[in-house]
Image: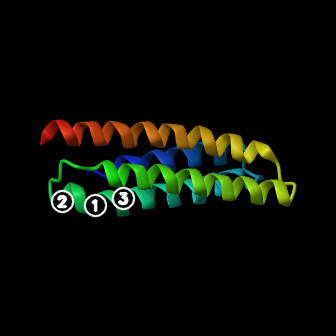
Amino acid sequence: MRFLMGYLWVFLSCITLYFMHPVSTLWWTCFSINIGLNTIYVLLFMKPYRLQQRDILKPILLLITLQIFIFLIVLAVFLHYQLSMIHMIYTVCVFLGLLTLQVREQIRFLKSI
């Protein structure tokens, strides 16, 4: 249940985008990028959460670095191929919600130890 909320948020947000713009690939772009970012989060934090480690500073710094790096790569691809920036705007909006859930989950984890 601990890592389920991020995936649920991405699925619900992308389904909403699909119904708002059914002919566009907007939902697919948003879904693939945010599922990838949440999977990175799950892979980085599964071990510390399972072992009840209190020191999660290294995984947090690695997560922030990887997520920013991935966003910069995606932005460079969008700029290079002159793709619509509205895709990136929606992707960032869904990501901010995902980030809020991740931070909330980390705070609850630290309070439980």
Would you say 64 lies left or right of 14 here?
left
> On residue 42, which mark appears?
3
Q: Where is residue 100 in the image (x, y as percent from the top left)?
A: 43, 36
Label 2 neighbour load within 10 Å: few <14, some 14-19, many 20+ = few
Q: Specify the amino acid type for callout 1.
A: Met
Q: Position of residue 53 (x, y in %)?
A: 17, 53
Q: Which of 85 and 59 is in front in this view?
A: 59
In the image, residue 82 above or below residue 103: below
Q: Where is residue 83 in the image (x, y as percent from the top left)?
A: 83, 54
Label 3 neighbour load within 10 Å: few <14, some 14-19, many 20+ = some
Asked whether the residues under the numbered discs 3 and 1 touch, taking CB atoms below 8 Å apart as contact, a structural biologist would say: yes
Quadrant that contains the C terminus:
top left
Would you say 10 lies left or right of 26 here?
left
Q: Residue at x 31, y 57 (%)?
A: 45
Would you say 112 lies left or right of 18 here?
left
Residue at mark 1:
46
> On residue 50, which mark appears?
2
What kind of element bears circle 2?
Answer: helix
Q: Residue at x 69, y 57 (%)?
A: 74
